[in-house]
Amino acid sequence: MKKYFIWFCLLALLLSMTMCSFASGQQEKEISIGLVTYDLTVSYQRVMIDAAQKKADELGIKLVVFSSDWDATRHLNIIDNFITMEVDGFISGSDPDPSAVIPGIKKMNEAGIPVIDLDNGALGGKVDYYIGFDIRDSSARAAEVMVQELKSRNNGQVPSGVVIEVMGELIEGFASECSKGFHSVIDQYEELNIIQGDGQWNNDDAFNVVSDFLTRFEDEVVAIYVHTPDCMGVGTVGAVKSAGMDPKDIVLAGICIGPEGIELLKKGEFTTIVEQPMGISAEMAVELLYKIITKQPGLPQIGDTIIQEGALWSPAEVIKSPYADGAYIKLKGPLVPQEVAPDDPRLWENMPIF
């Protein structure tokens, strides 16, 4: 009997240890978040991934990153893969086509996976939070500085002349909003003739577009507005120099700086650029998803204002998203160099990875 009793105790102990191990494994299940971006080589996409990874490491979260390579169909396939992988949260780092990705966002919704959009948001489905700066408002602010500078160089008057608008792809909501913001200001001045060219988000196309217009209009060009100097600024300035002109003699403005834009500002070859607070938006996305997944209280609500002392993106309003069902955390983007110096360490472009 004593022998059977000992075997019974050992069996009970083994079962107990097995159950504890199973329960512990359930409690310690690793949280995973999927992030899709459209280009792993672009600087603002790289800082997005880097910032998200740092926050994920801090919170003990597994971050899985894929690139859609500018392909909306691949973007949708990646979403399907994330659902199959049973990720706990999803970050859409940039949507190559905000309308085309709607079915994928809806699939995420059906799977009960919380979604956060960065950079440019999907135009449908439920997106728990869209985090970004106000593209239209930022473009308008940059255009206002452009007009002020033109006036200061011409005895307080807006001169007659040509303004080149170097555009991104209008299929993207980002480019469309950028253009609308710019025109909300610049169209008030009949003295200015606006001509548009497609820079396709790259320096080569921007160079060709600006070179062509400078050949046609020469000294009539008084200003150039570049949708995103972080990827079209160097090409634009290069075209100006190739035409035998000094960039400092033309008013250049835009939104989104990037490391190359910082250098252009330091050289005085751009008059103003509004910075897109990319790093903090990615950090915020990971932290918010973590709070949603772990059911923590205190999530930002529509009508709130998020304030962080000394942060360039603060204060940030939380409003109803104009893009999809959900909230929009509207971060502030600083004018550089008017509000913040190009070498300010708080700008993500000055982070150590660059």
Image (cartoon, rainbow, N blue to C red):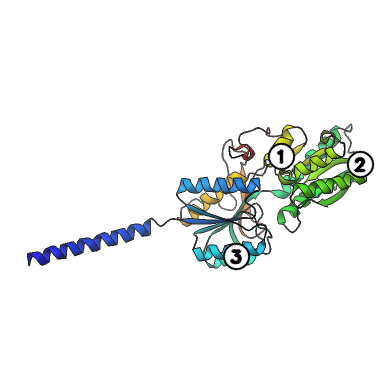
Whether residue 189 appears in this view of the structure is no
Quadrant location, the C terminus: top right
Locate residue 315 relative to residue 286 in the image: left or right. right
Mark 2 and mark 1 lie on one chain; the one further toward the N terminus is: 2
- Amino acid bearing label 3: Asn
In the rendering, which numbered label is found on residue 84?
A: none
Q: Residues within 10 Å of mark 3 (few under 14, many from 20)?
A: some
Residue for point 76% across, 41% down: 234
Q: Residue at x 59, y 53 (%)?
A: 302
Query: Do callouts 3 and 2 mark residues in contact (Cβ within 8 Å)?
Result: no
Confirm or deny contact between disc 3 and disc 1 (CB under 8 A): no
Which residue occupies 84% across, 46% down? 210
Q: Which residue is mark 1?
A: 261
SS for tag 1? Answer: helix
For disc 2, the marked residue is: 218
Asked if residue 287 is positioned above or below residue 351 in the image, the reply reads: below
**In this picture, residue 217 sits left or right of residue 36:** right
155 and 233: which one is in front? 233
Around disc 1, counting alpha carbons within 10 Å, would you say few (fewer than 14), some (14 to 19), or many (20 or more)? many
N-terminal of the pair, mark 3 or mark 2, is 3
Q: Is residue 27 visible?
A: yes
101, above or below 47, in the image: below
- The span from disc 2 to disc 1 (Cα, nearest Å) is 24 Å
The residue singled out by tag 3 in the image is 77
Image location (x, y in percent) of residue 160: 92, 41
Q: Position of residue 232 (x, y in %)?
A: 75, 46
- The amino acid pointed to by label 1 is Gly
* Element class at badge 3: helix
Mark 2 crowdedness (10 Å alpha carbons): few <14, some 14-19, many ≥20: some
